[in-house]
Image: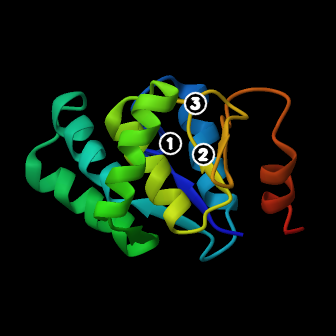
C-alpha cells in the first residue's frame, strides 16, 4: 500500500509543535514499512518554509533536512494534471490550493492514504483517504499497515 505524508507530519517529526504530536509523528514514520511512504514535492517546499520561518533554521540547515527527507522517501512531482485536479478540489470542496495539490498528487500516484491533520479525517477523494494520526479511534487501514498486515 502506498501512502503520502503531509507537511505537518514532517514538521512535527522535525520537532516543531507540542511534544505529544512530535512523538506520534516520529513513531509513525519509524513504524512505516520500507518503501510505502511517498512525499509530494509540495510538502518539502512547505517544510523548508516552516523550518526557516518558524524554527528559524538557517537555509543551509533547512536544505540538509529537506535532502535527508528526499533520501528517505520517494518524492512525487506535481504535474499539470495534478494542478487541474487541485483547482477542482478548491472549487468543489473549498480546500486551500496547496493542500488540494498535495491530495491530487497523492491520488495521481495511487496512494491509499494521506497522513495529515489539515483535512477532515475520513474524507476520501479518488481513492485517497485522509487519516489524522493524532485522533482516536485510530484508522483501521493505517493500523493494519503499521502492524504489517497490508
Q: Residue at x 44, y 26 (%)?
A: 17
**In this rendering, is residue 56 above or below 128?**
above
Q: Residue at x 82, y 37 (%)?
A: 138
Location of residue 91 by image quarter: top left
Residue 115: assigned label = 2
Q: Nearer the viewer, mark 3 or mark 2?
A: 2
Label located before the other in sequence (3 or 2): 3
Label located before the other in sequence (1 or 2): 1
Task: Sort mark 1 into few (<14), some (14-19) or many (20+) by Cα contacts within 10 Å.
Answer: many
Q: Which residue in the protein does label 3 denote?
A: 21
Q: Position of residue 111 (x, y in %)?
A: 61, 63
How far separated are the C-alphas under marks 3 and 1? 9 Å
Q: Nearer the viewer, mark 1 or mark 2?
A: 2
Q: Position of residue 51 (x, y in %)?
A: 24, 39
Q: Residue at x 63, y 27 (%)?
A: 120
**In this rendering, is residue 56 above or below 84?**
above
Indicate left or right for 142 with 43 as reference.
right
Q: Are marks 1 and 2 in contact (CB under 8 Å)?
A: yes
Q: Which residue in the protein does label 1 denote?
A: 9
Find numbered disc 3 in the image and state the secondary structure of the residue it sits on.
Answer: helix
In-front residue for pair 48/2: 2
Find numbered disc 2 in the image and state the secondary structure of the residue it sits on.
Answer: strand
Amino acid at each position: 500500500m502506498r501512502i503520502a505524508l503531509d507537511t505537518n507530519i514532517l514538521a512535527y517529526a522535525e520537532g516543531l509543535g507540542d511534544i505529544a504530536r512530535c512523538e506520534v509523528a516520529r513513531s509513525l514514520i519509524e513504524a512505516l514499512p520500507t518503501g510505502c511512504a511517498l512525499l509530494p514535492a509540495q510538502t518539502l517546499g512547505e517544510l523548508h518554509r516552516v523550518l526557516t520561518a518558524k524554527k528559524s533554521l538557517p537555509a543551509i540547515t533547512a536544505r540538509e533536512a529537506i535532502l535527508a527527507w528526499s533520501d528517505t522517501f520517494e518524492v512525487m512531482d506535481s504535474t499539470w494534471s495534478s494542478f487541474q485536479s487541485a483547482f477542482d478540489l478548491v472549487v468543489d470542496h473549498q480546500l486551500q490550493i496547496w493542500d488540494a495539490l498535495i491530495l491530487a498528487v497523492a491520488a495521481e500516484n495511487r496512494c491509499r492514504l494521506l497522513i495529515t491533520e489539515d483535512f477532515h479525517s475520513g474524507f476520501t477523494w479518488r481513492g485517497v483517504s485522509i487519516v489524522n494520526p493524532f485522533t482516536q479511534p485510530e484508522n483501521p487501514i493505517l493500523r493494519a499497515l503499521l502492524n504489517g498486515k497490508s
